[in-house]
Amino acid sequence: MKPPLRTIGTMPTSPFLPAPVMSPVAEGSATHCPYCALQCGMHVAGGAVTPREDVPANAGGLCQKGWTAAELLTSPERLTTPLLRGRPATWDEALDFTAARIRAVQEEHGRDAVAVFGGGGLTNEAAYQLGKFARVALRTSRIDYNGRFCMSSAAAAAGRAFGMDRGLPFPITDIGRADAVLLAGGNVAETMPPFVRHLTRIRDRGGRLVVVDPRVTPTAALADLHLQVTPGADLALALGLLHLAVAEGHADLGYLAARTTGFEAVRDSVAAWWPERVERVTGVPAARMREAVRILGGAERAMILTGRGAEQHAKGTDTVTAFVNLALTLGLPGREGSGYGCLTGQGNGQGGREHGQKADQLPGCRRIDDPAARAHVASVWGVDPGDLPGPGRSAYELLDALGTPGGPKALLVFGSNPVVSAPRAGHVAGRLGALDLLVVADVVLSETAAMADVVLSVTQWAEEAGTMTNLEGRVLLRRRAADPPPGVRGDLAVLHGIAARLGHGHRFPADPRTVFDELRRASEGGIADYSGITYERIAAETGVFWPCPRSTEDGGPHPGTPRPFLDRFATPDGRARLVPVEHRPAAEEPDEEFPLHLTSGRTLAHYQSGAQTRRVPALNAASPAPYVELHPELAERLGVEDGETVRVRGRRGAVECAARVSRAIRPDTLFMPFHWEGVNRLTNPALDPVSRMPEFKVCAAMVERLDAPAGARGKGDR
Ligand SMILES: Nc1nc2c(c(=O)[nH]1)N[C@H]1C(S)=C(S)[C@@H](COP(=O)(O)OP(=O)(O)OC[C@H]3O[C@@H](n4cnc5c(=O)[nH]c(N)nc54)[C@H](O)[C@@H]3O)O[C@H]1N2
Ligand SMILES: Nc1nc2c(c(=O)[nH]1)N[C@H]1C(S)=C(S)[C@@H](COP(=O)(O)OP(=O)(O)OC[C@H]3O[C@@H](n4cnc5c(=O)[nH]c(N)nc54)[C@H](O)[C@@H]3O)O[C@H]1N2
Ligand code: SF4
Ligand SMILES: [Mo]
């Protein structure tokens, strides 16, 4: 049993660490789940979790991961002391070593020789501080984060169309008010189970759900219509749906004239995507496409939502743009109960992409190459704008350059496990191994932490206060509900400790409330404006939607913005932009040697790289080992039995795992979850030209029995 909340503010002290001043509203048992972007409300007390009823996203529901979230707080597998070269060390030893090595590397190789890799699970305060730490304490341009692997394509497409990237630009409860929803590449029944209640509300009212997925997932099983698309073909499908919407008279010409630009060019660009051609490219029968368009076009209120299945491609930005074009043609965005939305993934996937962990970004969703943005943020930070570095490199490009001539020689990782989760992970592990210094701040000894020179043992969610922004753009309060064990410090305290040793301690307070107040000022006037949000307001209102400027035009408190596009879009002229896009094949299509599509994603019991959930006994028991899902026809052809260990091979490597024979998948496709080391040794790091998203969702592969002759085996990364 977890002991009840003791005194607040007993973080381990060091000569560099000011005593944290915790805000009273930031303490208590009412908090949010540590895992996904739904950020289900929960109470945590005495080691037990109970769902909150007052948070609309989950309204009393939780998934298995949420119910068991507190187990890792007291698990023997959590880190309770820093490690230096694998041995327990004091904080002073670990931080002194880290700072000295950073100095030495920068003196020898320049500032950009030290890089930072962040995470979308960090609080807004930690994400903000990490971006500032890179630019001010390290003065390196080399920072990016795992969100690049997540919703960056949807973010780029939303920015292009609407001038603003807010995952859902409406409250989640609007979804249940729609009469039709098309969900492309999202498996919410496993990835956000309490979300399903918003979808079933549609069906209860007689509305309809269309799901696009190469697999008959538990979500597809809920749908009225399932489009079982070939992996990598969503762009062609969206063009085909748009062609049909125009041909069958569903284009909302009044809305298009009043609220958008670019329709004519887009209409002309889809003229050649007639249904039978699209059927050949996507494998989706033309009749089903017609039915989907009838459902969407005939609905009073409709929504188009995308998940990672449509987005994690080397053409993800254009694919999302094609779905946004469809939504705009039907007149949906900016209408109550209708719209386009992307389902953000990580706990703070939304806030984590707003406040400066991105290579090209400053707080408030400002661009780091915008002189006005640099001047504003530099003034809040008390530095010269000329001293701020310029844009860095995207996540995979950063990892790929580690330890190369001219590339970073040191890396600090906060909140990610790229050895498991990065594309072409065997190669990435090799790059990490070539570094002079690897520092990882984590709660457990992840596969990446196991490679590190220095491991910094940090607090977990329930032991820290801060804010998280959920998939709706609602800023929530994470309360401190338990004391951390001795030997553990918060991410903010860790950053303070390193910064202090580099001579910048005064710029990096460890108290979340103080950091949030600075974040408010830094974001003020930006797209993601948090300046009117306070811990007290969040506590009183169960979250505040950004943008929330300091005050309204007449000086009153700003109410926050649940639906930012009702009157105008965030573009300079207030209109949404339709942008013509063209379909192209996946970067790696099947061939004779590798005749199958390999796709990847999630299962219910595990979270991400599995670093946390593989250490929770109940979750591990529910899903103990990696597997590859394949169709019975394919299994029969290969002579593979259900449960047999097989080898999956691709151009970059091979892995062995159990075969799971299932009719739920297309016969030409394999699916593997990425919660264990394995599938990412095969995935293709081909990048989207705009978002720099890697092609996680499709590469070419083959599967074989273990006793297959080894002769034809290609060379891989390891
Ligand atoms: N249980 C669990 N829940 C999670 C997470 C987790 O790790 N585990 N992670 C969280 C995070 S960070 C994220 S980003 C979200 C992700 O949430 P989702 O997007 O729902 O998750 P995925 O399983 O990655 O992908 C969704 C579906 O895309 C399908 N798919 C694969 N290729 C294609 C394709 O080419 N086209 C289409 N249309 N579909 C395709 C897959 O079959 C899969 O069912 O989940 C969040 N919630
Ligand atoms: N093949 C394939 N690969 C994928 C995907 C896919 O669909 N297919 N999806 C991609 C997506 S969408 C994502 S989001 C990434 C995610 O992949 P990762 O970035 O690896 O995500 P996590 O496993 O959540 O890693 C978070 C790490 O931070 C630690 N941690 C937890 N809380 C804290 C904290 O408060 N502070 C610190 N410092 N550390 C903490 C955890 O223990 C864990 O080790 O994977 C991507 N990789
Ligand atoms: S759906 Fe997401 S936020 Fe809710 S309990 Fe499950 S993992 Fe946690
Ligand atoms: Mo994600």
Image (tube, helix red, strand yellow):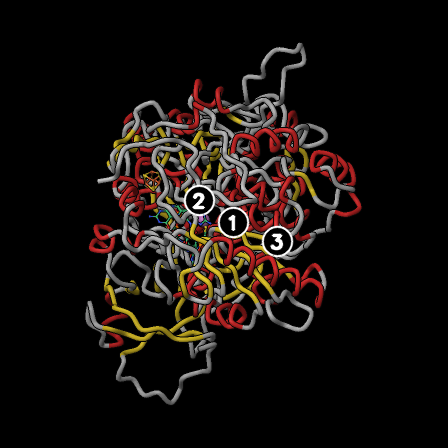
Q: Residues within 10 Å of mark 1 (few under 14, many from 20)?
A: many
Q: Residues within 10 Å of mark 2 (few under 14, many from 20)?
A: many
Q: Secondary structure at mark 2?
A: loop
Q: Amino acid at mark 1?
A: Gly
**Residue under label 1:** 147
- Give the position of the N terminus as an image quadrant: top left
Specify the label residue 143 is tagged with.
3
Specify the label residue 346 is tagged with.
2
Q: Ligand 2 within 8 A of label 1's CB?
A: yes
Image point 50% across, 58% down: which residue? 93
**Mark closer to the chain start, 2 or 1:** 1
CA separation in Å, label 2 and label 1:
8 Å
- Counting from the top left corner in percent of width and height, residue 184 is at 43, 45
Image point 39% across, 36% down: which residue? 39
**Front residue of 441 and 537:** 441
Image point 66% across, 60% down: which residue? 103
Residues marked 2 and 1 touching at CB (< 8 Å): yes
**Mark closer to the chain start, 3 or 2:** 3
Q: Ligand 1 within 8 A of label 2's CB?
A: yes
Q: Secondary structure at mark 3?
A: strand
